[in-house]
């Protein structure tokens, strides 16, 4: 006696009593802030007095994007469709609270029994019975049986409060999960009463000071089927699980977080042997120091084009149509790495390893010795056999175990899905691999080019475009470096020749009809050579003619010179003769003069 | 309040009704349920019923054990089949139908 049931609004409000809780969530003004870490976050409008205490979830990534965890002492709502991971998230919140912080928790299950929950989570390495024994966890299964309930008048859910209060007090719970209270809507018909009671429940939990996680089914066009988001104002997390072309992808988004900065993207997450983990798109790679170490691409000419090869831990993307040589390029890189003794992990999505090894042998790349000595490992699975998640899980595991220096994913196109899907899955993988200093070689069909340029390209360090060119009844391959971070590179198209001798990159031949390749290039080159030869011959002929003319002229000059010489000589001889004659005459005069002195002068008149 | 109440006039009844009403002390609906049920029993089950009224606040463990979702909850344990009603029992027709007491 002496207890009064709290007055609760029962009649007079409709499906969405927004007025009870202020304005509706999605229209709330938001303030984008740059946080200390430099990341953009959002602070939802609301009371921000003091620093909000947080309860770490222990979920990798989630604590990062919530900047510390869920609001301590408040109620958080986790909504999502069936199988989205709501139960797991809330259970992991309790388990990590219990094991890491020693905070006891109560898991109120409206669906699974204690035994079922223990069995279902044992594979995640969680020992629920053990935690229960140590009084760190209490699983409370609330049976909701709609079949044999007759409603005959006014009622309330006070027993739920009594039961919860009793259990919380018994274990001294700091954390509480309710999964999922919406089961009540299936058993009881008075919806407005139920909503009012749940609202009262959330307020009551807050008053108790426990940190609570409430799960709810995703509704059509709304966050939850019964509009529970109206009653949870502190933190709302949305989980999404989509299956597209047999590929399963999971996404998490923080819809609101009052008084706290939070990431606003849709974050991919996965559920694997380690539990729940969220991949913030930008967190890991940012702090990394870029390496300037080069790793050879396995094709010498390509190394030259790239200024010495790929950067270590770079992400290399080779995109191109079917048969454009993507796998060959990957194999060349793998061979080069294996020859250096570096381990390679090859995720073959489209071919079996045997097929791949055989095909590569046909272009002179023998991978088999590396498979035998354990330098090269293949992970082969058809994408259609398991979802994206399973792929990622397996890849993660194998990367951790095998510790490769290079990982090839051939091809991404096998991960069918929308560009956003591809991007987020890629981001997760690449960031994880980058963080481990692994060089990543990706191939993708050119169909994906649009998406690649849309979002993927920012994740890719070196992007090689492979293309097929049809000309004169012949298909030829070409390669161009679309992008290469930290490298001066030519974006000129070069011919990419695959033969039994391996890969050869041939410099482009720009002929009259544009860039020429294959036989056309050879023909054009031959034609050009012939023309060159003829030109050369003509030139030689004219050179010869010139030389002949030169010789003739020289000969003429020689003749003229000789004549001149002769003339000069002749002239010189005359002058000498005359001089001699003169001198003789002078002599004669003198002789005659002296004779006159002694006798009469004979020739004085002659002078 | 949690005392079993047996009508003294029903010595060896042929068809003994065993009723348990779970309530929460202080709740208006609970109080109304007790009153409504008494009226029905006096009218139709005089001398052939037992009624136990249990305050769940005093026995919180029973909430889980008996799977009580809401209060007031009336459980007819006998005669079989067991029947569960919730509410203040103000819907007299529904109560009578559920308890298989016909229209009176």
Image (cartoon, helix red, strand yellow):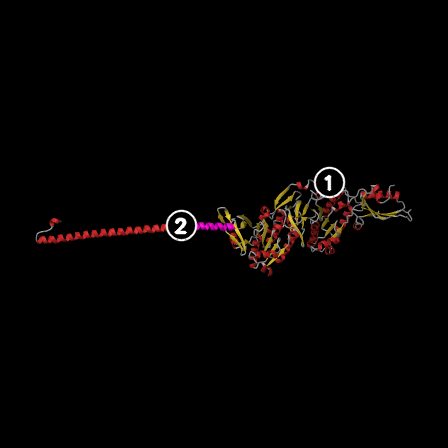
By secondary structure, the bulk of the magenta-drawn segment is best described as: helix
**Residue A230's quadrant in the figure?**
top right
In the current view of this chain or complex, which residue is farthest to the bottom?
A373
Depth order, front residue of A345/B37: A345
Q: Residues within 10 Å of mark 2 (few under 14, many from 20)?
A: few
Q: How far is the residue under mark 2 from the one under mark 1? A: 96 Å
Depth order, front residue of A574/B31: A574
Share a chain, discs 2 and 1?
yes
Residue A276 seen in this snapshot: no
Query: What residue is rendered at 71% in x and 39% in y?
Result: A19
Question: Subunit of mark 2?
Answer: A
- SS at circle 1: loop
Q: What numbered label is drawn on residue A539?
A: 2
Q: Residues within 10 Å of mark 1 (few under 14, many from 20)?
A: few
Query: What residue is rendered at 35% in x and 51% in y?
Result: A548
Residue A588 located left or right of residue A161: left
Query: What residue is rendered at 24% in x and 51% in y?
Result: A568
Magenta stretch encompasses residue A450 = no
* Residue at which label 1 appears: A15
Residue A362 seen in this snapshot: yes
Question: Subunit of mark 1?
Answer: A
């Amino acid at each position: 006696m002496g207890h009064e049931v709290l007055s609760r609004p029962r009649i007079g409000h409709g499906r969405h009593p927004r007025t009870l809780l202020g304005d509706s969530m999605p229209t709330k003004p938001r303030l984008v802030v740059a946080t200390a870490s430099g990341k953009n976050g959002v602070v939802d409008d609301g009371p921000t007095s003091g620093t909000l205490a947080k309860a770490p979830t222990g979920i990798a990534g989630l604590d990062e994007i919530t900047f510390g965890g869920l609001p301590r002492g408040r109620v958080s709502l986790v909504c999502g469709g069936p199988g989205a991971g709501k139960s797991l998230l809330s259970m992991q919140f309790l388990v990590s609270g219990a094991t890491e912080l020693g905070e006891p928790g109560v898991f109120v299950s409206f669906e699974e029994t204690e035994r079922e929950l223990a069995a279902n989570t044992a594979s995640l390495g969680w020992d629920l019975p053990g935690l229960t024994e140590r009084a760190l966890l209490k699983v409370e299964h609330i049976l909701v049986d709609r079949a044999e309930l007759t409603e005959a008048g006014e009622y309330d859910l006070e027993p739920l409060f009594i039961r919860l209060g009793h259990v919380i007090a018994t274990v001294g719970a700091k954390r509480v999960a309710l999964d999922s209270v919406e089961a009540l809507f299936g058993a009881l018909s008075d919806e407005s009463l139920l909503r009012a009671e749940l609202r009262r429940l959330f307020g009551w939990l807050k008053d108790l000071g426990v940190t609570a996680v409430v799960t709810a089914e995703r509704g059509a066009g709304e966050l939850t089927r019964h509009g529970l988001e109206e009653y949870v104002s502190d933190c709302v997390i949305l989980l999404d699980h989509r299956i597209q072309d047999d590929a399963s992808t999971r996404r998490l988004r923080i819809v609101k977080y009052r008084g706290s900065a939070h990431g606003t993207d849709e974050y991919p997450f996965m559920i694997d042997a380690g539990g729940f983990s969220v991949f913030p798109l930008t967190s890991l790679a940012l702090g990394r120091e870029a390496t300037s170490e080069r790793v050879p691409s396995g094709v010498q000419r390509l190394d030259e084009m790239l200024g010495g090869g790929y950067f270590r831990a770079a992400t290399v993307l080779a995109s191109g149509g079917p048969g454009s040589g993507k796998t060959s390029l990957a194999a060349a890189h793998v061979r080069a790495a294996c020859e250096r003794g570096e381990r390679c992990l090859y995720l073959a999505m489209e071919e079996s390893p045997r097929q791949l090894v055989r095909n590569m042998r046909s272009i002179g790349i023998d991978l088999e010795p590396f498979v035998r000595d354990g330098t090269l490992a293949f992970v082969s699975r058809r994408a259609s056999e398991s979802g994206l998640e399973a792929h990622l899980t397996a890849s993660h595991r194998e990367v951790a175990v095998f510790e490769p220096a290079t990982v090839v994913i051939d091809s991404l196109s096998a991960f069918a899905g929308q560009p956003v899907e591809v991007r987020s899955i890629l981001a997760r993988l690449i960031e994880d691999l980058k963080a481990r200093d692994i060089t990543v070689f990706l191939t993708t069909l050119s169909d994906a080019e649009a998406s690649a340029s849309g979002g993927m390209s920012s994740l890719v360090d070196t992007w090689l475009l492979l293309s097929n060119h049809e000309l004169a009844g012949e298909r030829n391959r070409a390669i161009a470096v679309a992008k290469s971070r930290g490298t001066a590179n030519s974006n000129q198209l070069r011919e990419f020749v695959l033969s039994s001798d391996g890969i050869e990159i041939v410099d482009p031949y720009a002929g009259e009809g544009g860039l020429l390749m294959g036989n056309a290039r050879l023909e054009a080159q031959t034609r050009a050579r012939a023309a060159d030869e003829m030109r050369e011959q003509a030139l030689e002929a004219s050179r010869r003619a010139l030389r002949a003319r030169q010789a003739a002229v020289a000969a003429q000059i020689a003749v003229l010179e000789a004549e001149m010489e002769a003339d000069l000589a002749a002239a010189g001889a005359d002058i000498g003769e005359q001089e001699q004659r003169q001198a003789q005459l002078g002599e004669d005069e003198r002789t005659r003069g002296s004779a006159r002195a002694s006798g009469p002068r004979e020739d004085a008149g002659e002078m | 309040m949690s005392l079993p109440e047996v009508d003294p006039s029903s010595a060896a009844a042929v068809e003994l009704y065993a009723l348990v009403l779970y309530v929460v002390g202080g709740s208006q609906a609970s109080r109304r349920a007790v009153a409504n049920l008494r009226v029905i029993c006096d009218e139709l089950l005089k001398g052939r019923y037992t009624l136990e009224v249990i305050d769940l606040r005093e026995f919180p463990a029973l909430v889980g054990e008996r799977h009580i979702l809401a209060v007031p909850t009336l459980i007819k344990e006998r005669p079989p089949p067991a029947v569960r009603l919730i509410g203040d029992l103000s819907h007299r027709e529904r109560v009578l139908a559920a308890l298989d007491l016909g229209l009176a």
